[in-house]
Amino acid sequence: MRYIFKIASALILLGTLCCASELRLFVMVPPQLESVRKIAKDSASIELLLPPGANPENFSPTAKQIAALSGADAIFLIGLGFETMLRPRLENRLQPGTLRDCRIGMKLRQMENHEHEDKTHADPHVWLSPDNMMIHAKHVAEMLSALRPENAALYQERYQAYCLELQNLKEMIDLLLKDKFQGKTILTQHPAFGYFLDPYGISQIAIESGGKEPGARHLSRLLTQAKEENIAVIFVQPQFSDKPARALKQRMQAEIISLDPLPEVYCQDLYEMAQNLLRGLTLNDAANQPQR
């Protein structure tokens, strides 16, 4: 009986040590979750800062969230505006190297719709490029390997497996969009899709103006441009008000299609987004056909 008790005690202690050694990781937005989950697996708990359905453009972390971040082993940054406020509040509370800017190594593009401002703005929606997410995954694998060097080979293996998934995703999306819509334009509520559209020669125009709901003059310009280009579809995003889009829909006789720029099940959701884009672009092309 005493022997069994010792074994049970040892197992309980081992379990406690395993739980204590679990890494605590934070990501900023849902698209980061899949790569971190697939590389870390059960060696970490993974927490998302942006609440479900929230708009990252106007999100501000709460004091409770900042306190939680102070206990992180790693925080994977992605270049959003609210991170600028987070950095100085966290750097004195965290071990050096805890904050990881996952944009390092990515080729950034400039954001549309800032033509009336003096500054240029890097487009923050880097996650909508599978190539960028391969770089993101590399940052994750390197960070985890530094924290748990004994598992480095395993993290590297998982990283390579996930990159293969992303490469397969790229090839599947290419089959839908490559060389089919070059020079075409989509009309979207929020200009989030540049990283996704650029490889296919597709441009975007946004209903919002400078991050705000459009005024009458901007709406008038949009109507003129949409008519000139025979745009028949308006893409809306669930994190933003679709009221301006619905007002335009009535005047354009357009169809509304939802595109979520924050895919959580990344590979599955991004492919679904490509299918919805294909549908919208095909409808736009149909609107360009002469009436018989």
Image: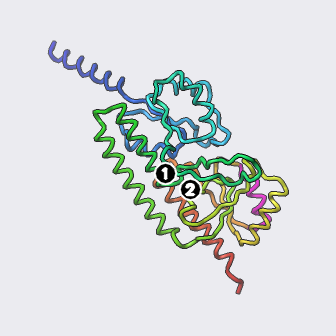
Q: Could you tell me which residue is drawn at 41 percent across and 41 percent down?
A: 37
Q: Position of residue 5 (x, y in %)?
A: 20, 15
Rendered view: 238 above or below 285: above
Q: Which residues are magenta?
A: 241-253
Residue situated furthest right in the rendering = 216
Q: Nearer the viewer, residue 22 or 202?
A: 202
Residue situated furthest top in the rendering = 2
Could you tell me which secondary element the residue under label 1 belongs to? helix
Residue 97 picture quarter: top left
Q: Position of residue 209 (x, y in %)?
A: 75, 52
281 relative position to 32: left or right: right
Could you tell me which secondary element the residue under label 2 belongs to? helix
Per the picture, the main secondary structure of the magenta-coloured stretch is: helix
Residues at discs 2 and 1 in contact (Cβ within 8 Å): yes
Rendered view: 125 above or below 48: below
Tag 2 residue: 195
Q: Position of residue 130 (x, y in %)?
A: 47, 54
Rendered view: 99 above or below 29: above
Q: Could you tell me which residue is drawn at 61 percent across and 49 percent down?
A: 123
Tag 1 residue: 132
